[in-house]
Amino acid sequence: MSVGGAGAEGLPLPLREGVGGRGSYTPDPSPQPPPSRGGGVFAAGRLARALDSDMLYSFRRSPVAMLSAAIALILVLSAALAPWIAPHDPMDLASLSLLDSFKPPVPMDGSDWSNILGTDNQGRDVLSAIMYGMRISLVVGFCSIIFAIFLGIGIGLLAGYAGGVMDALLMRVADVQLTFPAILTALLVDGVIGAALPRTMHDELQIQVMIFAIGISLWPGIARTVRGSTLVERNKDYVMAARVIGVRSWRIMLTHVLPNVIGPVLVIGTLGLGLAVLAEATLSFLGVGLPPTQPSLGTLIRFGNDFLFSGQWWVTIFPGIALVLLVLAINLLGDWLRDALNPRLR
Amino acid sequence: MLAYILSRILQAIPVLLVVGFIAFAMFAYIGDPVASMLGQDYTEAQRVALVHQLGLDQPFFVQYAHFLWATLHGNFGISYRLAQPVGSLIAERLPATVELAVTASVLAFVIGVPLGVYTGIYRNAFLSRVFMVVSLVGVSLPTFLLGILLILVFAVALGWLPSFGRGPVVHLGWWSTGLTSWAGIKALILPAITLGMFQMTLIMRLVRAEMLEVLRSDYIKFARARGLTARAINFGHALRNTMVPVITIVGLQFGGIVAFSLVTETVFQWPGVGLLLAQSIAVADIPVMSAYLLLVSLLLVTINLVVDLLYYVIDPRLRVDRGAARVR
């Protein structure tokens, strides 16, 4: 802890002074003021310091957190590096052969090691399809939750800091939206945009539409949390001081209040990433998500579903397992983060 | 009490008006009904006549009022996809969805509460840990994937239960039910488990958490000191006091049942309202979407209202402000 270190360093100074007497005091450059912990500290610095001490300690003490972090890391890396490490390119139609279709996964009869998890009806390697699919799932998930966080922080800060009519209005909107389950909101927004856009633009814009729909469905929870913490921070002395010296409202909000309310958002954001990935998979499974040209995990599961009755279970079950592992790892990490950031739970 | 009820109802009305406005905006501005009704060849006079006939030349708020009036009379327009009135389309599919949702909720409650009590009382038992891990998987497993797994095991591999549809259906007046025959009940089992699983894990975790809290309280210690039987303490005193928050949360979570009935109905091709919506969204059938939005919001607002009132009825200690704080 940096506070303890600064205190211990500072301690010998008066002692030396006492021993040597007033006259023998030589100006010593060593007594540096302790690093400022006040208002102007940015989230990045705080995060680095947090990672330095308590967080890392709690992380190393929690086997669940380490295991889920490892799984998440493996899945994210295999998705990010898919074009280089995937055994086949599922998007390359020329390399597919119908002769290879419906090869079972490895321990079964008729399988071979070049397609460890088997192949689908077009002879596509299931493992490679999962890696590429997870790439799209993660991109949509990350972008949606970041969109939701920006929206939620903006609206929450504004509502909490401005108060009054603005607060009542914005929170009423959030309440109304919270009445609806997020997945239903995302579905309807997706459907309405789909109806409003011309048919020809559907496939190319579908990723953006999904990000918008899922992001819109997740903002109220974040906005409420940010508003709650902002209401607390707004009345603290440092905000009052900033106001007195004439700092503009938007500057106080962004550089003083925001860093102090960002902690809970980190937790909601992590758990929200799990929700966003699930929402994307659900919409794609329902057939209103990503088109077959950009198959995400949900799209893969939907296609595989058609072959369930003819016995080719691996086409749908393996993408399903990948999805569950990904979401479970994200959720467990989010739970751990919530406990680690909440000092009351220690 | 009366003032409280009235204020809750008055708060619900603006919500419904806003949702009605959104539904109207979807209806009025997305897609061009005039162009699709006129076809290829038309004169300007025909177009103007049709616009007038549909009331599209009226001021905005007059159109909105007309829309609300028609909606209140159960007239939701014509489905683009099926060319039938949306009101009757939904009415004929509603029994299937209600049967599925009610069965799933009952199942979740009947299994979830005992499991929650058990894991709450014997919190360190091996079986409790197993239940907790399973419930974690239940929370993380997407509904559609659970449905696919159940189909794979019980329909494809074992062949015990049907994997799609509702089985034979008996019509009783305007209601149709599949519960009168064994085949109909068998068809209901897998979808109901799929839909109820998330609620079940939720109820179980809630009851467990509340039990843990209540069992630590003084009156339980006092009941033990009096020498009451474990059964009287656990069920008569502890469980009873966990029920208020559980019923509230379950009521508020009903929206989840509605939303995921859509997913479940798609997996099992269950002929309900959710499947209708999923099919309509895929082809941008706006009238069905706006009618669904209106009906679901009416349902959810009503449920929220009922839960608020139940709160007041069940526990008089809870005043309005504290009540809001306890609904996490």
Image (spheres, helix red, strand yellow):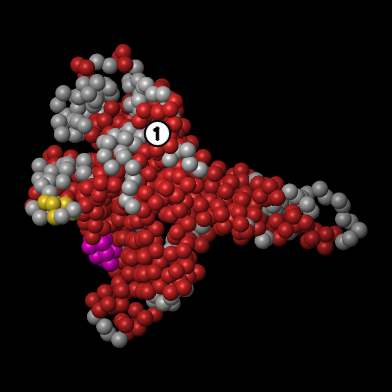
Magenta-span inclusion, residue B4: no
Percent x, y for residue B289?
A: 36, 42
Q: Amino acid at mark 1?
A: Leu
Measuring 54% from the left and 44% from the top, which residue is drawn there? A151
Percent x, y for residue A59?
A: 47, 49
Measuring 71% from the left and 57% from the top, which residue is drawn there? A238
Percent x, y for residue A156?
A: 57, 51
Q: Left of A205 or right of it: where is A241?
A: right
Magenta-span inclusion, residue B114: yes
Q: Left of B259 or right of it: where is B1?
A: right
Query: What's the magenta region?
Result: B109-118
In the image, A114 versus A80, the foreground residue is: A80
Percent x, y for residue A206?
A: 42, 30
In the image, A128 versus A233, the foreground residue is: A233
Figure check: B120 above or below A134: below
Query: Disc 1 designates what residue?
Result: B50
Q: Would residue A313 be visible to someone looking at this image?
A: yes
Figure check: A219 above or below A241: above
In the image, B27 versus B253, the foreground residue is: B27
Callout 1 secondary element: helix
Measuring 41% from the left and 77% from the top, which residue is drawn there? B316
In the image, B116 versus B41, the foreground residue is: B41
Figure check: B18 above or below A209: below
